[in-house]
């Protein structure tokens, strides 16, 4: 097959390209230029869009003897990922830009351009596995559970999966690094990128405050009592404990967490841990990694990128008044830190069933206990 | 073997030049040394200087060897600017055409950002040509404030050739020095330092079958420049650094050979260029020639330059598809981190950004043959159709 290997300049995508080549595919390396104005050198281990990174990717492509191009998707990335990220935070939600990027950039803008140019598929260095199942291709967790990235791929539909390769899914990170070194790639020891690539210093709140209007406001407890002040409600996340600087300690001395972010009133509500627990999650923006299921299902639910998988009962709702299905995810055990805007990804064993964006959450009215 | 049609980027070294350089490479000797080995190297340098000067109508003492076109441009522009402003602080304005190579543009912009230069950009015609009257207009805004004028001999993207003697007439009337970037012109158009009227002319070896890393600034003897680098005082105290005997030899032989065969080679390349442009326009895909083009013309357009505007395409998609089909061409414009930018030349010519993105530069050189054109024209239609579909996706 003719395959575009997306090459960030990191070790994973380098080995991905090499493995696709070894598998006999015709491989072209493509680095995505996503930053509006790329800086020349990496400032930290976090970013992945500098000219230095493009150069690292090019070195690997040269070594493999494959053609290498830089495709400029900066405008699409800004519209579909960065502006979405800002709008979500402005609405008091906590988005996951990596899922958006996979859904709209890597496996949409990039894939579409690749297909139009005559390629058959896109390969990336994500840690996840594609397995041929009875109903077509299935997306599964990686073998290396510490590196598993199936969560951020939970937005891919059957058509996108049919055009994707994840050749690292059966390997551990250590194996991939060792292979990169054995292949003589200069990036073998390059540190992993972390967090959000377009916020190189990792200070999300500072980045948001530089871009979104905000003004000082109050932090209140569950009873509405002012317990502190903030510089702007924007950027707080449900479940957050650090960085609140509460002026009045709780009577019981227990830590308090963000329970609600209300940008309209510019108020952040905090509460003790036991009040944050929720066991019913409603999600929209539903995406199925294969044929859509229906009815009530027993599935595992993962509600953050590196979170645990939680046993849950999932109901797929198809309201007549909307074209889009909604999910109701009933967790067996209450969880705190369920932030609107984050994605809930559903698993059946190791198989990714689909995902939704958390719209709201609540505590079930207790009926039996 | 892929078909190489990017000779304006760089072209193959002539075999006899490579051979002479390989022989010289084996010899030891610094041309500035006084012993036998040094004298032998100096003899090669000075013979190269005379050979180069002879081929370009310059006096040997007007040749300053540099590392290439970029250094020659920078040395000339920054050097003349600083010398002229030191002599008279009012002379802080640089008159520069909007379609220059980045070696000129970015140097001028750096002088504006760091050295207090003011800049007057001379617009070009829709053909990419810069006229003497446009230069005159820019100068006459305030002639006493002009430190220098810099205009290229021939445009590296669209191949438009400027009337250097006419422009020099204007600058000379005001006593203002003229720098000309002739990197694309040498070997393809008659370049004569003694009659062109310019004070400084930049040339590069690797565009004419010489080595990369060798260039020269032809600089009038009475023209003062402030050096960019300081050291041993070689090259009239203007360009310090150990002289590159091998590079100077290779450049002089390549330029001499190209100039000797210029008339016939220009006609030959123009025929390849014309069949490329005619063939592309005949494909019924709305392709037009960028710049000024008349069949068999070797005066107003570089003979080896076919510049095509392909509507509805991104140049980088075309580039990839043609590369995959074994045909190596260019968009003609600079990349930023590998991302092609819309050409400042095409924008200055009045093209919309969208149209400027579909540019393709096909350039011929001494190794080009008619079957190269056939290969390009055979690969082009499928590439255009596919690139158009891809353009609809992003």
Image (cartoon, rainbow, N blue to C red):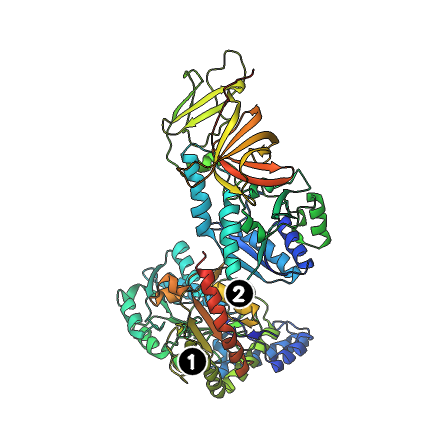
Residue A79, x across and y down, in percent: 42, 47
Residue B168 against residue A363 in the figure, above or below: below
Q: Nearer the viewer, residue A154 or B129?
A: A154
Residue B233 against residue A55 in the figure, above or below: below
**Can residue A195 be seen by looking at this rendering?**
no
Name the residue rendered at 46%, 44% in the picture. Answer: A81
The residue that disc 1 covers is: B278
Q: Nearer the viewer, residue B39 or A211?
A: A211
Name the residue rendered at 58%, 52% in the picture. Answer: A162
Which corner quadrant of the image does residue B277 belong to? bottom left
Classify 10 Å Cα crowding around label 2: few (below 14), some (14-19), many (20 and above): many
**The N terminus of chain B appears in which quarter of the rendering?**
bottom right
| Res. B320 mark | 2
N-terminal of the two: label 1 or label 2? 1
Residue B25, x across and y down, in percent: 66, 74
Q: Nearer the viewer, residue A45 or A127?
A: A127
Name the residue rendered at 40%, 61% in the picture. Answer: B108
**Can residue A186 be seen by looking at this rendering?**
yes
Q: Chain of mark 2?
A: B
Residue B339 against residue B200 in the figure, above or below: above
In the orientation shown, which residue stands out farthest toward the top?
A251
């Amino acid at each position: 097959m003719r395959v575009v290997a997306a090459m960030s300049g990191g070790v994973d995508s380098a080995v991905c390209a090499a493995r696709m080549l070894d598998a006999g595919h015709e491989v072209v390396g493509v680095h995505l230029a996503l930053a509006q104005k790329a800086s020349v050198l990496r400032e930290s281990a976090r970013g992945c869009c500098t000219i230095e990174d493009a150069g690292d990717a090019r070195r690997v492509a040269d070594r493999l003897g494959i053609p290498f191009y830089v495709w400029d998707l900066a405008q699409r990335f800004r519209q579909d990922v960065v502006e979405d990220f800002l709008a979500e935070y402005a609405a008091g939600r906590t988005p996951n830009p990596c899922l958006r990027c996979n859904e709209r950039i890597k496996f949409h803008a990039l894939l579409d351009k690749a297909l139009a140019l005559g390629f058959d598929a896109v390969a990336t260095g994500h840690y996840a596995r594609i397995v041929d199942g009875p109903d077509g291709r299935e997306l599964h967790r990686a073998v290396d559970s510490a590196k598993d990235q199936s969560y951020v791929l939970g937005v891919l539909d059957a058509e996108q999966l049919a055009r994707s390769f994840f050749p690292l899914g059966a390997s551990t990170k250590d194996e991939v690094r060792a292979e990169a070194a054995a292949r003589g790639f200069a990036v073998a020891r390059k540190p992993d990128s972390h967090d959000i690539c377009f916020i190189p210093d990792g200070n999300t709140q500072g980045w948001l405050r530089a871009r979104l209007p905000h003004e000082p406001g109050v932090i209140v407890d569950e009873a509405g009592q002012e317990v502190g002040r903030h510089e702007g409600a924007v950027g707080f996340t449900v479940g957050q404990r650090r960085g609140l600087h509460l002026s009045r300690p709780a009577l019981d001395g227990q830590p308090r967490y963000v329970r609600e972010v209300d940008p309209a009133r510019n108020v952040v509500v905090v509460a003790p841990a036991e009040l944050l627990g929720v066991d019913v999650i409603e999600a929209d923006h539903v995406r199925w990694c294969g044929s859509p299921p229906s009815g009530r299902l027993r599935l595992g639910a993962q509600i953050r990128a590196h979170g645990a998988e939680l046993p849950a009962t999932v109901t797929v709702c198809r309201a007549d008044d909307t074209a889009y299905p909604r999910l109701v995810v009933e967790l067996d055990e209450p969880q705190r830190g369920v932030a609107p805007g984050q994605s809930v990804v559903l698993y059946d064993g190791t198989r990714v069933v689909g995902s939704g964006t958390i719209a709201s959450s609540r505590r079930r009215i207790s009926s039996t206990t | 073997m892929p078909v190489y049609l990017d000779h304006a980027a760089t072209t193959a070294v002539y075999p006899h030049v490579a051979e002479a350089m390989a022989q010289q490479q084996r010899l030891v000797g610094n041309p500035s040394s006084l012993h036998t080995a040094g004298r032998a190297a100096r003899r090669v340098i000075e013979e190269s200087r005379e050979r180069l000067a002879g081929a370009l109508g310059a006096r040997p003492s007007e040749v300053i060897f540099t590392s290439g076109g970029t250094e020659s441009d920078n040395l000339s522009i920054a050097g003349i600017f600083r010398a002229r402003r030191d002599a008279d602080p009012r002379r802080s304005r640089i008159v520069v055409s909007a379609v220059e190579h980045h070696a000129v543009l970015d140097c001028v912009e750096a002088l504006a950002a760091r050295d207090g230069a003011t800049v007057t950009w001379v617009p070009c015609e829709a053909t990419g040509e810069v006229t003497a009257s446009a230069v005159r207009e820019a100068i006459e805004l305030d002639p006493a404030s002009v430190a220098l004028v810099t205009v290229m001999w021939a445009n590296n993207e669209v191949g438009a050739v400027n009337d250097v003697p006419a422009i020099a007439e204007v600058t000379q009337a005001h006593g203002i020095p003229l720098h000309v970037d002739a990197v694309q012109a040498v070997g393809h158009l008659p370049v004569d330092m003694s009659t062109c009227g310019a004070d400084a002319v930049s040339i590069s070896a690797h565009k004419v079958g010489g080595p990369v890393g060798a260039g020269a600034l032809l600089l009038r003897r009475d023209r003062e420049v402030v050096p960019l680098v300081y050291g041993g005082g070689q090259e009239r105290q203007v360009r310090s650094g150990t002289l590159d005997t091998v590079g100077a030899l290779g450049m002089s032989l390549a330029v001499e050979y190209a100039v000797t065969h210029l008339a016939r080679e220009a006609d030959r390349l123009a025929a390849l260029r014309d069949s490329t442009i005619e063939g592309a326009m005949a494909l019924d895909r709305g392709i037009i020639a960028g710049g000024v083009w008349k069949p068999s013309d070797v005066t107003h357009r570089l003979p080896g330059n076919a510049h095509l505007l392909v509507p509805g395409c991104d140049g980088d998609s075309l580039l990839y598809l043609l590369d995959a089909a074994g045909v190596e061409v260019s968009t003609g414009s600079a990349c930023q981190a590998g991302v092609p930018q819309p050409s400042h030349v095409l924008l200055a010519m009045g093209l919309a950004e969208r149209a400027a993105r579909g540019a393709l530069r096909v350039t011929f050189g001494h190794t080009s043959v008619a079957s190269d054109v056939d290969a390009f024209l055979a690969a082009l239609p499928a590439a255009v159709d596919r690139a158009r579909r891809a353009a609809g996706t992003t």
